[in-house]
Image: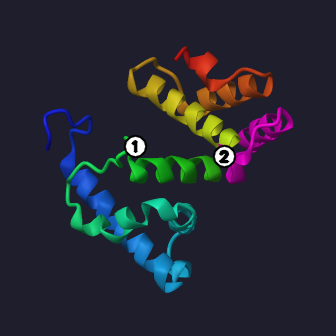
Amino acid sequence: MMADDPFPYPELRNASHEFFAKVWRAQKSGSVKGLSHEGQRLAQRMASHPEWQAWWERADDLGDGLAVTGAGVNPFAAVTMEAIAEGLIEENSVARRAYRRLQRDEYTHEQARTEIAMAFTGVLGECETGHGVDFDTRLRQVFRRIMRGESAQEIFGE
């Protein structure tokens, strides 16, 4: 692990890279049907980023190495957040309504999906820091605030 590495669990990152490699192999071979619904969603997100294909191709060779592009983006984290937001939009009625509100406000799909992801990570951060908040309840509250016109950035003060 590198000294300035913000992720202190290299074994989990290694397992994650191996999972991404499995998902990418399924995507390339056209056998995503054998993956879970979440795995299929992740495969679709990975396929939508040809600029990161080299990362997908060598994912299981990365081990616990930190994966950051020249632009400073962790492609694995980025597609994971996209897949989480896509899942929320698809499966969570309050997230879906917040997403629709954002689109009415002329957000592109990518911008609205990012806002949903930011809401998710903001609530996750609150729960991780011990604010004593129920994750699902707080996430619904945040999505409702987005529906009223607030941004995740305004809600979480970043």
The N terminus lies in which quarter of the figure?
top left
Residue 20 visible? The answer is: no
- Camera sees residue 61: yes
Question: Which residue is depicted at the point 63% across and 16% down?
Answer: 154
Q: Along the horizontal axis of the image, is 92 left or right of 3? A: right
Instruction: Name the residue rendered at 14%, 40% in the picture.
Output: 2
Residue 39 horizontal/vertical position (percent): 50, 66
Find out whether the residues at labels 2 and 1 contact each other: C-beta distance under 8 Å.
no
The CA span between labels 2 and 1 is 19 Å
The quarter of the displayed image where residue 16 is located: bottom left
- Measured as percent of width and height from the top left, residue 29 is found at 48, 85
Category of crowding for the residue at label 2, using alpha-carbon neighbours closer than 10 angstroms: few (below 14), some (14–19), many (at least 20): few
Q: Quadrant of residue 119?
A: top right
The foreground one among 71 and 4 is 71
In the rendered structure, does residue 94 fall within the stretch colored magenta? yes
Could you say whether the residue bearing mark 2 is in a helix, strand or loop? helix
**Residue 77 spot, x, y in % from top left:** 42, 48
Image quarter of residue 155: top right
Tell me the element at label 1.
Answer: loop
Asked if residue 129 is positioned above or below residue 48 in the image, the reply reads: above
Residue type at mark 1 is Ala
Residue found at x 43% / y 71%: 23
Characterize the magenta stretch by its predominant secondary structure: helix
The foreground one among 84 and 141 is 84
- In this rendering, position of residue 27 left or right of residue 129: right
Q: Residue at x 56, y 33 (%)?
A: 118
Q: Earlier in the sequence, mark 2 or mark 1?
A: 1
In the image, the segment drawn in magenta is 89-110
The amino acid sitting under disc 2 is Glu
Q: Which residue is mark 1?
A: 71
Give x and y (percent) for residue 125.
45, 27
